[in-house]
Image (tube, rainbow, N blue to C red):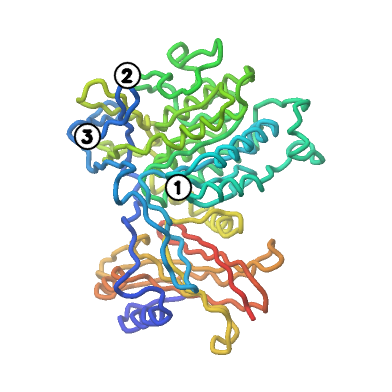
């Protein structure tokens, strides 16, 4: 274990070493746009307010809203209004020196969009059609707000990070081939044939587990970005129900969340208010109740609204229950669902454009009992003729218990995030200076981390000192992408006197790692872990060793 002691001279000396490699000038100290929240007791709800014509209402004030949790009024602690015209709605990529990389989100937009291309649930014919429609969309449309594309495979796979470059998004989709399923000899292209037999939309137990685990990972990754995120989920089969059906706000209408209309004969929520309760409690789905709660809360904490798009299109009347699940997921998270239409390009366009204008309300619940039960949220406004879309509630999971469960899977989760196909993690933010091996460094790769202290959790002890525990590590992938070389992952502890703590908070928290590398070109995955909260940060870069 490496120790940064409490002596000001020692810790300040480390800071001076990092300053010497020009990570950042003192006048441009590394700071988060906001202090990252780790307290799940703060409930954040995004509200889309529209008039009778579906146009956003932009002049509501905090006093125009009332928030109820389980029927009890709550004090609104935070209120903000977000819209595309805000001068602070977006931020350009950071301009960093050639040897420095950062995992800080490149975009700080009032609304981000994520496309999730589902290859786990459904058959390859629908996936082929959905891919063609996405390529067509990005070939004909410009992108106003940042979009990222992920593929849901056996693991979550980042196809392209957030960008407004429609050409780049189209290119990565054209090159992408979903993995073959069932018969290992079949290919993606062979299943595109109109004569192929369409399979059942249902998934199996492995598919359900994969969907839940990777959706949870995606939500945690997106939590590092401020503001609302629209998750455009293209899939043929939605195997999970995230919320109980026993609580529905007064005046709720599924039609407000559905684009394309219900299938003929499909029952509505009002016709059968217990349909979803029976669905989630039937079969093997009941075995995933605990994970379902975690995923639901992770989506809430990340401010994610789900926009399911039925990749099967028109003519698949044998998956009504799946469409019900899509409607449920959209309505309970404040999104919309697109079903019974073959025009997936229009569906994607509508999903990307929706929700750019919204209000954010936050409050600390009056009920401090964290019993894991679902707590319904109802939001009202004094303004007449206003339609509100928002998240219907959350599960009151015990934050301490969640942290313990996360700690039990810490090694597995960190290893997964350091794999090459894993998306960047941004809950702990940092910059890193990469110095290739030289005679001066005794042929060792040196990586100096400058961690944003506002994304770390410091704990003050009775002696007035501030304590933190941080793990920094480097994984180097050479020609053999399967077996990276790894630096040590020792815990760096800091026991800081108040004056040193103040200095760190104005600059950054330092950490460094070395790694012996032979000549060649390597892809580096850089990772930082806060051992107090188990939050992570990762990024990727390359280095050539002469």
| 24 displayed left or right of 182 | left
Report, in whole angstroms, how far the alpha carbon at label 3 lies from the one at label 1.
25 Å
Residue located farthest toward the bottom when viewing the structure as drawn: 439
Q: Which mark is residue 59?
A: 3
Q: Disc 2 on helix, strand or loop?
A: loop
- Disc 1 designates what residue? 146
Residue located farthest toward the right when viewing the structure as drawn: 185
| Comes first in the chain, label 2 or label 1 | 1
Q: Is residue 125 visible?
A: yes
Q: Is residue 1 visible?
A: no
Specify few, some or many for label 1: CA neighbours under 10 Å numbering under 14, 14-19, or 20 or more: many
Near-viewer residue (187 or 290): 187
Locate residue 431: give its quadrant: bottom left
Place of residue 245 in the rendered image (x, y in percent of width and height, measured from the top left): 44, 22
Residue placed at 46% from the left, 61% from the top?
103
Q: Which mark is residue 250?
A: 2
Q: Disc 1 on helix, strand or loop?
A: loop
Residue placed at 31% from the left, 24% from the top?
387
Disc 2 + disc 1, Cβ < 8 Å: no
Q: Is residue 124 above or below residue 172?
A: above
Specify few, some or many for label 2: CA neighbours under 10 Å numbering under 14, 14-19, or 20 or more: few
Disc 3 + disc 1, Cβ < 8 Å: no
């Amino acid at each position: 274990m490496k120790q940064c002691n409490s002596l000001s001279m020692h810790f300040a000396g480390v800071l001076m070493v990092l300053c010497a490699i020009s990570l950042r000038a003192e006048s441009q100290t590394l700071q988060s746009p906001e202090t990252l929240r780790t307290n799940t007791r703060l409930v954040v709800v995004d509200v889309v307010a529209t008039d009778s014509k579906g146009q956003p209402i932009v002049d509501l004030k905090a006093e125009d809203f009332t928030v109820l949790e389980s029927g009890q009024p709550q004090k609104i602690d935070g209120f903000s209004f977000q819209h595309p015209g805000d001068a602070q709605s977006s931020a350009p990529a950071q301009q960093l020196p050639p040897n420095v990389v950062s995992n800080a989100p490149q975009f700080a937009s009032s609304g981000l969009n994520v496309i999730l291309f589902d290859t786990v649930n459904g058959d390859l014919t629908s996936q082929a059609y959905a891919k063609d429609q996405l390529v067509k969309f990005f070939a004909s449309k410009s992108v106003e707000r940042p979009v990222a594309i992920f593929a849901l495979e056996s693991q979550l796979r980042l196809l392209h990070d957030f960008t407004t470059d429609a050409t780049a998004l189209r290119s990565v989709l054209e090159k992408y081939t979903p993995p073959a399923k069932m018969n290992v000899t079949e290919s993606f292209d062979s299943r595109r044939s109109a004569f192929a037999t369409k399979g059942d939309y249902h998934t199996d137990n492995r598919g359900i587990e994969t969907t839940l685990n990777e959706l949870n990972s995606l939500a945690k990754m997106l939590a590092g970005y401020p503001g609302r995120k629209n998750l455009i989920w293209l899939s043929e089969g939605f195997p999970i129900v995230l919320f109980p059906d026993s609580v529905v706000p007064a005046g709720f209408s599924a039609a407000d969340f559905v684009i394309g209309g219900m299938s003929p004969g499909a029952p509505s929520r009002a016709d059968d208010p217990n349909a979803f309760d029976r669905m989630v409690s039937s079969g093997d789905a009941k075995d995933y109740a605990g994970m379902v709660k975690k995923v639901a809360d992770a989506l809430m904490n990340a401010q994610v609204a789900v926009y399911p798009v039925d990749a099967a299109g028109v003519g698949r009347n044998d998956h009504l229950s799946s469409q019900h699940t899509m409607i449920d997921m959209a309505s309970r998270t404040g999104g919309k669902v697109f079903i019974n239409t073959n025009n997936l390009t229009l569906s994607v366009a509508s999903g990307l454009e929706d929700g750019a204008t919204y209000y954010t309300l936050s409050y600390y619940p009056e009920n401090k009992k964290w019993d894991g039960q679902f707590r319904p949220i109802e939001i009202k406004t004094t303004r007449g003729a206003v339609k509100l879309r928002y998240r219907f509630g959350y599960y009151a999971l015990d934050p301490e218990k969640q942290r313990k469960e996360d700690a039990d899977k810490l090694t597995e989760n960190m290893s997964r995030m350091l794999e090459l196909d894993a998306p960047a993690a941004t809950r702990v933010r940092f910059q890193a200076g990469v110095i290739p091996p030289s005679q001066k460094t005794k042929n060792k790769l040196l990586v100096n981390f400058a961690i944003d202290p506002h994304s770390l959790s410091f704990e003050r002890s009775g002696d007035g000192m501030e304590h933190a525990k941080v793990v920094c590590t480097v994984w180097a992938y050479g020609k053999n992408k399967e077996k990276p070389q790894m630096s040590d992952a020792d815990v760096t502890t800091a026991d800081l006197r108040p004056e040193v703590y103040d200095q760190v908070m104005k600059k950054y928290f330092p950490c460094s790692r070395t790694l012996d590398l032979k000549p060649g070109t390597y892809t580096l995955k850089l990772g930082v872990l806060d051992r107090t909260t188990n939050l992570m940060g990762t990024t990727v870069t390359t280095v050539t060793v002469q």
